[in-house]
Amino acid sequence: MSNRRLLNAEKRMNIAKLTSMWCAGFVLIGALSGCATFQKCGFKGCPGDAQITAEVQALFDRHPELGTTIHVQTLDHVVYLYGLVPSPLFSAIAESVALEAPGVTRVVNSVAPENI
């Protein structure tokens, strides 16, 4: 092979290595951001998360129109809702009700209407 071809091959290898390092860096950053919550909360969740989940469930029990198809999880005082409801209005009601629970900092609402 000529020197020119060798230089081009080396450049391509260096670019490939650099690209691989960047990709690995982004993956590592993503993984470490998930660890921040784990270190703060541990395997059993953050202190108070179970109580928040229970409070939200109790509030939902006072609203029978929401039905029993909404599931609640809490992590670091953020309530995650998922399930099915009869219409988009009920999804908004579920989010509003969850925000009433003491200690809730935010609600991530993944409740969807059944007939879409």
Image: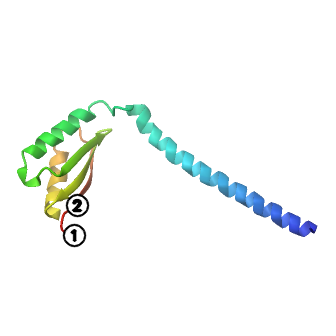
Q: Residue furthest right?
A: 2
Indicate whether 87 appears above or below 103.
below
Where does residue 73 sit, x and y in percent of width and height? Answer: 27, 43
Q: Depth check: 71 or 51 in front?
A: 71
Q: Label 1 amino acid?
A: Ile
Left or right of 33: which side holds 9? Answer: right
Q: Quadrant of residue 18?
A: bottom right
Contact between labelled residues 2 and 1, with CB atoms less than 8 Å apart: yes
Indicate whether 22 appears above or below 37.
below
Q: Depth check: 111 or 22 in front?
A: 111
Question: Which residue shows up at 6% across the image and 45% down it?
Answer: 62
What quarter of the picture does the N terminus occupy?
bottom right
Answer whether residue 59 is visible to the viewer in this image: yes
Left or right of 78: which side holds 35? Answer: right
Question: Which residue shows up at 93% across the image and 69% down it?
Answer: 2
Q: In which quarter of the image is residue 36?
A: top left
Q: Quadrant of residue 49?
A: top left
Secondary structure under the numbered disc 1 in the rendered image: loop
Indicate whether 46 appears above or below 107.
above
User: Distance of mark 1 from mark 2, alpha carbons?
Assistant: 8 Å
What quarter of the picture does the C terminus occupy?
bottom left
Q: Mark 2 points at which residue?
A: 112
Secondary structure under the numbered disc 2 in the rendered image: strand
Answer whether residue 101 is visible to the viewer in this image: no
Question: Which residue shows up at 73% across the image and 60% down it?
Answer: 15
Q: Mark 1 points at which residue?
A: 116
Where does residue 45 sit, x and y in percent of width and height? Answer: 33, 34
Question: Which residue shows up at 60% across the image and 49% down it?
Answer: 25
Q: Residues within 10 Å of mark 1 (few under 14, many from 20)?
A: few
